[in-house]
Image (spheres, grey):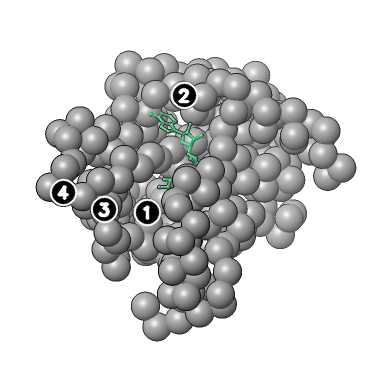
């Protein structure tokens, strides 16, 4: 994992208490990256942290900070970024370029509230938009607060200055549609548009912003889908299996890493499907 050059950096991961976010937190730890785990499920994060600590992999060079946070709540998100910077400041820093503030953000927090549109309550629409789309906006907004960007990411394309990276998680559902998911598809389509527009805004500051678009991935979210629907889904997948969260996490780590420094404003699909 040292090839990724993520060691001794710090990354915020939302939705780190389960599924893809948990796998990202583990993969970053394995790359000796420090991780600020944020989720509204404190127990989930505690379990993930225990798994990291008891794993046979060497996570000893990676430090963790856990923040219970609802990504749809602006005050809690502002506090998350402040806590993340304070945590990073407790870690060593050798130069301004290696300023211990946090330069990487992964937005994995997400929910579904599936229903046919004829029955969909306004609350089901609002909840999904609030977490998936507004939550992504809020974390990006406060991660890129004017004071932070002026200090951490001054304008100019000097690649010797440390760069930043944001990875948002979209969904194949916004590309292909899916029964009972107009709210979810709209939220993930919004994430895609937000990512492209934001990438243009911050390119001059050497910050890359990309969307990872998973297909069907094993996680508590996908396990909630009824078996007969999952069976139908598998037949849409060329490789005839759901993906593992770890496979998504590897792609996320690559997009966070300086190894992908010339990729921004992109959406990268990871679905096992050929010719979408
Ligand atoms: N699993 C899939 O097949 C799949 C496919 C495409 C996209 N995705 C996306 O990947 C991301 C991760 O999903 P997953 O499959 O790991 O699901 P998951 O349910 O396992 O994990 C989602 C996490 O987000 C957290 N969360 C929910 N609402 C929150 C809030 N308001 N504030 C903070 N945290 C909150 C949950 O507590 C949970 O830990 C989501 O954005 C999801 O939409 C998943």
Is residue 142 visible to the viewer in this orientation of the structure?
Answer: no
Q: Position of residue 240 (x, y in %)?
A: 56, 75
Q: Nearer the viewer, mark 3 or mark 1?
A: 3
First-in-chain label (4 vs 3): 4
Give the residue pinned by disc 1. Answer: 170
Any atom of ligand 1 within 8 Å of the CB at mark 2? yes
Q: Nearer the viewer, mark 4 or mark 1?
A: 4
First-in-chain label (2 vs 4): 2
Measured Cα–Cα span from mark 4 to mark 1: 21 Å
Task: State the residue in front, 218 or 246.
Answer: 218
In the image, what residue occupies the spot 47% across and 45% down?
224
Q: Residue furthest front?
A: 228
Task: State the residue in front, 115 or 63.
Answer: 115
Badge number at residue 117: 4
Any atom of ligand 1 within 8 Å of the CB at mark 1? yes
Q: SS class of the residue under badge 1?
A: loop
Badge number at residue 40: 2
Measured Cα–Cα span from mark 3 to mark 2: 25 Å
Badge number at residue 180: 3
In the image, what residue occupies the spot 49% across and 57% down?
227
Residue 70: quarter of image: top left
């Amino acid at each position: 994992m040292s090839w990724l050059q993520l060691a001794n950096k710090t990354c915020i991961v939302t939705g780190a208490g389960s599924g893809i976010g948990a796998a990202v937190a583990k993969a970053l730890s394995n790359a000796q990256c420090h991780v600020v785990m944020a989720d509204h499920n404190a127990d989930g994060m505690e379990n993930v942290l225990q798994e990291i600590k008891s794993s046979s992999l060497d996570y000893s060079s990676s430090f963790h900070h856990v923040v219970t946070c609802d990504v749809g709540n602006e005050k809690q998100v502002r506090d998350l970024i402040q806590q993340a910077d304070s945590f990073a400041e407790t870690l060593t820093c050798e130069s301004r370029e290696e300023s211990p503030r946090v330069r990487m953000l992964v937005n994995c927090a997400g929910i579904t509230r599936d229903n046919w549109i004829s029955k969909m309550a306004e609350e089901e629409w609002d909840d999904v938009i609030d977490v998936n789309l507004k939550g992504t906006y809020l974390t990006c907004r406060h991660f890129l607060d004017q004071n932070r960007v002026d200090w951490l990411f001054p304008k100019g394309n000097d690649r010797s200055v440390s760069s930043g990276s944001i990875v948002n998680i979209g969904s194949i559902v916004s590309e292909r549609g899916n029964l009972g998911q107009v709210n979810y598809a709209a939220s993930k389509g919004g994430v895609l548009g937000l990512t492209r527009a934001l990438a243009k805004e911050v390119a001059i500051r050497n910050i890359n912003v990309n969307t990872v678009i998973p297909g069907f991935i094993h996680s508590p979210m996908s396990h909630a889908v009824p078996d007969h629907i999952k069976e139908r889904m598998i037949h849409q997948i060329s490789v005839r299996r759901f993906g593992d969260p770890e496979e998504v996490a590897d792609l996320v780590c690559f997009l966070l890493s300086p190894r992908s420094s010339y990729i921004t404003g992109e959406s990268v699909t990871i679905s096992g499907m050929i010719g979408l």
